[in-house]
Image (tube, coloured by chain):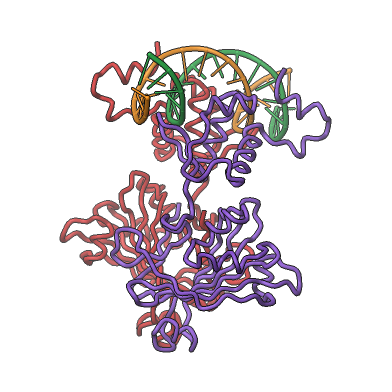
Chain colours: A purple, B red, C green, D orange
Amino acid sequence: MTKRSESTEKAGATLDFHPLYLQIKELLIQRVLRGDWRPGELLPSEFKLAAEFKVSQGTVRKALDELAAEKMVIRMQGKGTFVAARNTRHTPLHFFRLTIDNARRWQPRNTKLLSLTREPATETEAASLALSAGARVYRIHRVRYFENTPMIYEILSLAEDRFPNFEAIFRKDERANLYGLLEQTYGVLVVKADEMLRACSANERESSMLGVTPGTPLLSIERVSFGIDGTPIERRRMVCETSRQHYATTLT
Amino acid sequence: MTKRSESTEKAGATLDFHPLYLQIKELLIQRVLRGDWRPGELLPSEFKLAAEFKVSQGTVRKALDELAAEKMVIRMQGKGTFVAARNTRHTPLHFFRLTIDNARRWQPRNTKLLSLTREPATETEAASLALSAGARVYRIHRVRYFENTPMIYEILSLAEDRFPNFEAIFRKDERANLYGLLEQTYGVLVVKADEMLRACSANERESSMLGVTPGTPLLSIERVSFGIDGTPIERRRMVCETSRQHYATTLT
DNA sequence: AAGTGGTCTAGACCACATC
DNA sequence: ATGTGGTCTAGACCACTTT
């Protein structure tokens, strides 16, 4: 009796074949998103999971290894495997690459909300978020400060129909981490983001927001973030003053 | 008889303990760098390597899996494992993140060498490259064009004492890929790069190099690249005109 | 002492590519 | 038909953490 026979006995159904360990991985992802275990909590041991799924410990291990590589769980020898605490208020933002010059670590920033509106999507937004014509988006304008000087002006857009009642939920705690909120409220886990960077000149609005003279060179960042199934979640444009901070990234 | 006993029988020597598969991995890296197999060539099968190293096939597999994850080899089911062809003239540059707007694929660029000199390192260079006081660097100035318009002005610096006879070697084929050249000539494999981005205004020199008016906002990229052992290899500052191209990156 | 993840081994069957 | 990597299993010993 091999597990494999279950999938091969239907002839020609090889197209949707997934290795056992990937199926286990998907099941684990679903459970984490459903909140079976809260972030920071201990998962059952490899042997317990293996018994539950009726596979060998090595198969569960391979699934957990991949989840660990993707930072969804953290493995600690002798202690166990834990759900990674991501996107909480006290965790440095996962995708945030702007660093204060000469600073060793993450530098906290204050955020000032300018507006939260619900409007028809622009063409760019519709394209970025894969929306149909006439769809609406929630749009957030805000400014981020470091030590009382404005450093980033950003506009976020989310599809209205994917996040029902978003305004009320967001207003409950405007300082909460957006991705953490989406994860906890809608079970949507943001795992990837594409960013496009360029230099631009501060226009009237941007210069007044950031307290610089019009024409000052600014770093423009356009981000589209994606969920675990690859669907676009959020679009964001950031305009950053980079005389005291820089965008840091490491390539491999 | 366990393999493990070989490392544990010396008491207290646990500090430099490395799992077998990591030792295998290191050996394989050394051989690839030494050129035992050229890029694109087929490695021995897992079983042959296992027999040679006197370990089980599973252990070799784990080493190869890590090398594949790091893009040093490419595994192909049914065919074998190949040395990744990296940094050849026809391979898109591995670390190059600048993309022409609305282009689907890699867009080739022409490079114009302005100068190659040997000079004392500046303070910044010495710090970036971990050089001792008074050390000298090879310094390359060049401009990169897309369709005959200058897009990038860059200055590269390499430690003189780490790359003997660099000038003559570089002059032999000025259009060659630098990292490929370092790999083939010095056995130095560049595997990581840190980049710092910010917006700046074109100064006199930059504006004349890029054919823009002084004060035009430009994207400044400062890169330090590292070898497989973590030592800094090269420092580079790029200044880029971003009205027709952008810096693209994806975060996970 | 007990339980956990980390490593290593050995053998089996599979899908894929080549001959 | 043969050989390759991909997956799965089962069992062993190890180091680490907690009880």
Among all residues in the image, which is located at the extreme left? B133
Quarter holding residue B237:
bottom left
C6 vs C2, nearest the viewer: C2
Looking at the picture, does residue A104 appear above or below residue A5?
below
Residue B249: x and y in percent read 51, 61
Residue A220 visible in the current orientation: no
B24 vs B146, nearest the viewer: B24
Would residue B232 appear left or right of A96 to someone viewing this image? left
Residue A92 visible in the current orientation: yes
Q: Quadrant of the N terminus of chain B?
A: top left
Residue C6: x and y in percent read 43, 30
Looking at the picture, does residue A105 appear above or below residue B58?
below
A176 vs B129, nearest the viewer: A176
Among all residues in the image, which is located at the extreme top? B1
Total numbered labels placed on residues in the image: 0
Quarter holding residue B235:
bottom left
Quarter holding residue B221:
bottom left
Residue A188: x and y in percent read 61, 54
Looking at the picture, does residue B95 appear above or below residue A10?
below
Among all residues in the image, which is located at the extreme right? A11
Task: Identify the residue shown where x is 39% and y is 84%.
Answer: A211
A20 vs B55, nearest the viewer: A20
Task: Identify the residue shown where x is 37% and y is 64%.
Answer: A108
Residue D18: x and y in percent read 37, 29
